Image (cartoon, rainbow, N blue to C red):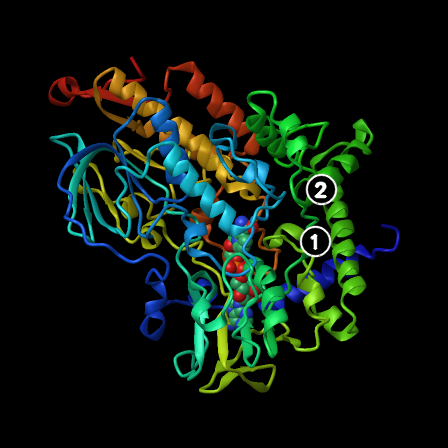
Amino acid sequence: MATVDKEALRAKYREERDKRLRPDGNDQYIRLTGRFAHYLDDPYTPVTERAPRTDHVTVAFIGGGFAGLVTGARLKEAGVEDVRIVEKGGDFGGTWYWNRYPGAQCDTASFVYMPLLEETGHMPTEKYAHGPEILEHCRRIGKHYGLYDNALFHTEVLDLTWDEQRSRWTIRTNRGDAFTAQFVAMGIGPLHVPKLPGIPGIDSFQGHSFHTSRWDYAYTGGDPSGAPLDRLADKRVAIIGTGATAVQCVPHLARACQELYVFQRTPSSVDVRDNHPIDPQWFAAVTATPGWQQRWLENFTANQAGGLADEDLVMDGWTDIARRFRSRIRAIPPAELSQETMLAAFEDADFEKMEEIRARVDAVVRDSDTASRLKAWYRQLCKRPCFHDEYLQAFNLPGTHLVDTDGKGVERITEKGVVAAGREYEVDCVIYASGFEVTTDYTRRAGYDLVGRGGRRLSEHWADGMRTLHGVHVHGFPNAFIVQPTQGANLISNIPHNLTEAGRTIAVTVRHALDHGYAQVEPTKEAEDAWVELLLSGAGRLLGSPDCTPGYYNNEGHDAGLKGRLNVGHPHGAMAFFGYIDQWRRSGTFDGLAFRSVADRFGRRETAGAD
Ligand code: NDP
C-alpha cells in the first residue's frame, strides 16, 4: 500500500461520484409500459385456463421464488400440509424463472446460495452454478416438498384484505380467484420489477429491443444454457448498462455480434471469478456429516458479517473483503483499537482491493484507453461487486466497443440507434441491462396493498418507512408475514440465507398457533417499536453510504431520510441477527408476538406472549 496516495484516491472517488449525482434520482427510471409492455408477458410457459378458486387454505404464500419455496418447505416439514403458493410466472423460480439471459449465474458460491441442498440431495455442478441449474433446483424443491399440488401459477394478487370476524385473509387475483387463508406470507423479491432508463426518444427506436430479464432468444438465437447466439452474426447490437447482469451476458454477445456497443455510465468492479466444476469425491467428503450446509452458511456469514471465523470454507471474493479487513484489524495494537482506527483499516483494505481490481483491468484489456475507462473509482461495496473471468476479456475482441459516457449515460435514442458521448451509433437491436426497481415502496413493487385490521393499509403503516418485528411480522396485520432481508440480517451477499431463516421463523409461529388453536398472531406495538428503535440505534447502513457513487445501494445518492435509515439490518450484523433469531425460535416464548384464540377476540382482548 506504500504506493497509494490515499488523499488523491479519496478526491478521485468524490469527483467521480459528483459527476454522477443527478437531481431526479430514482425518477430517472421508467417502467416497461407502452411498446415495451409485452416484454412483461411470460415468454416461457403458455397460460392455461383454470376455474377461479374460492376455497380456504391454511397458508397462502405470494411469490414462487426462493422465499416461497424455502418457507413452503419449512411449513411442510412442520406438518403444515395446506400451503398454496401464488406466483405470477408459469413455474417456480422467481428471479431465476424470469432472468434467462445468456451467462446468468449466481455470484455467490452454490453451496451457500442454493438452499436446501442437504434436504434434496442435490450436488451443484459448479462452484458458481448457472441459471438453468438453479431454476431446475427451484423445481426440485417444489417437487420434493409437494408444493406444486396446490400452487397457482400465472396468477397475480390484486387484493389482500384481513377479515377480523373470521380471522383470515381474503385473496383476490387477476384470475378471478377469491379464496381465503388463515395465514399469508409474502416473498415478492427485492428486484423483480424491471426498469428502463427514461432516455428521451426511447419509444422512437425502429429496430428490435428488449430488457435482459425477458431475453428474446427468438431474435438472438442461442438458449439459456449458453448455446451461441447464432442469429446475431450480421447484427449491430447496443447494450445499455454495465451492472452485474451486463457483466455476465456481454461475453456471450461479444462472441456473437457483428458489432457490439457497450454503453457504460459507471464501470462495475470486476474481480476474479475462478469458477470450477465440483468434484463428486470432494463433495461426498464435505457433505458426509449431517448439518453440513448450515455449517457452510454460518461460516460464510461469519467470514463477512460480524463473525470471527478462523476458517474460510467458501474462500472467494466476498469473504476476501472481510479477510483483508480482519488481518488489518489484528495488526492494530490493542491499546490503539478504536472506531477511528478500525474505519481507517477498513478503508486501507478497500483501497488495496480496488487497486488490485483496477490493475487487473490493465493486465487483461489490451487497449489502454479502453482499460482506463473500465476502471471503477469507488469503494468496492459502493456498488454490487462483480466477479467474472470473461467480461474484461470481451473488450479485446475486434467487434466489441466500449462507449463510455463519463458518468452521463446515454443521451438519446433515435429511430436508428443510440446517441452517447456526442455520437449516434446506428444499431439493429438495443438491449436494456438497466436493472430493477429496488428502493421504491414495497406496495408499489408488490402491485397490491395489504388491508389489515380496521382497514389500515400497509402503505399507510409504512408511510414513513418500514416497521416490523424481525423483518417478518407487522403490527396491525395479523397472521401476515414478510420474507425478505431488511430489518433482519440484511445479508446481501447471500439473499437466500435471509429467506431460509425467515421461513423457519414463520413455520414455528404457524405451528404454534395451530397447535394451540390460536386464531390470530401479531406482534405487539411495543415489540415492533422496540425493534425499530434497536435498528435505529445502529451505526447505519454498511452499504449505501452517501459518499458512494450513486446506485440502488444508496438510493441514487439521495438521502431517503427515515425511510432510508429503516432500510437496515440488525445493528450488530447478520451473524448477530441469525444467532438472536435462532435463540428466539428455540425459546418457545415467542417474545413480542401476541397470540389470540377465538374466545379472546370476542371477550378478553389480548393474550400477551405465547401461552
Ligand atoms: P443494475 O441496476 O445493477 O445496473 C443497471 C445498469 O444500467 C447500470 O450500469 C447503470 O449505470 C446503467 N444505466 C442506467 N441508466 C443508464 C443510462 N441512462 N445510460 C447508460 N447506462 C445506464 O442492474 P443489473 O440487472 O445489472 O443488476 C441488478 C442486480 O441483480 C444486481 O445488483 C444483483 O443484485 C442482481 N444480480 C445478481 C446476480 C447473481 O449472481 N445472483 C447476477 C446478476 C444480477 P449506473 O451504474 O451509472 O447507474
Horizontally, residue 31 falls left or right of residue 366, namely left
Location of residue 547 with respect to 581 vertically, above or below: below
In the image shown, does 565 or 497 lie closer to the viewer? 497
Picture quarter containing residue 586? top left
The amino acid beneath tag 2 is: Asp
Instruction: Give x and y (percent) for residue 363.
Output: 81, 62
Horizontally, residue 471 falls left or right of residue 405, namely left
In the image shown, does 49 or 115 lie closer to the viewer? 49
Location of residue 261 with respect to 180 vertically, above or below: below
Extreme-right residue of the structure: 2
Report if the CB atoms under discs 1 and 2 are less than 8 Å apart.
Answer: yes
Which quarter of the figure is the C terminus placed in?
A: top left
Give the secondary structure at mark 1. strand
| Residue 558 can be seen, yes or no | no
Q: Which mark identifies residue 405?
A: none
Q: Residues within 10 Å of mark 1 (few under 14, many from 20)?
A: many
The residue located at (52%, 80%) in the rendering is 411
Q: Is mark 1 within 8 Å of ligand 1?
A: no
Q: Which mark identifies residue 320?
A: 2
Q: Residues within 10 Å of mark 2 (few under 14, many from 20)?
A: some
Location of residue 568 with respect to 561 vertically, above or below: above
The amino acid beneath tag 1 is: Asp
State the residue position of label 1: 271
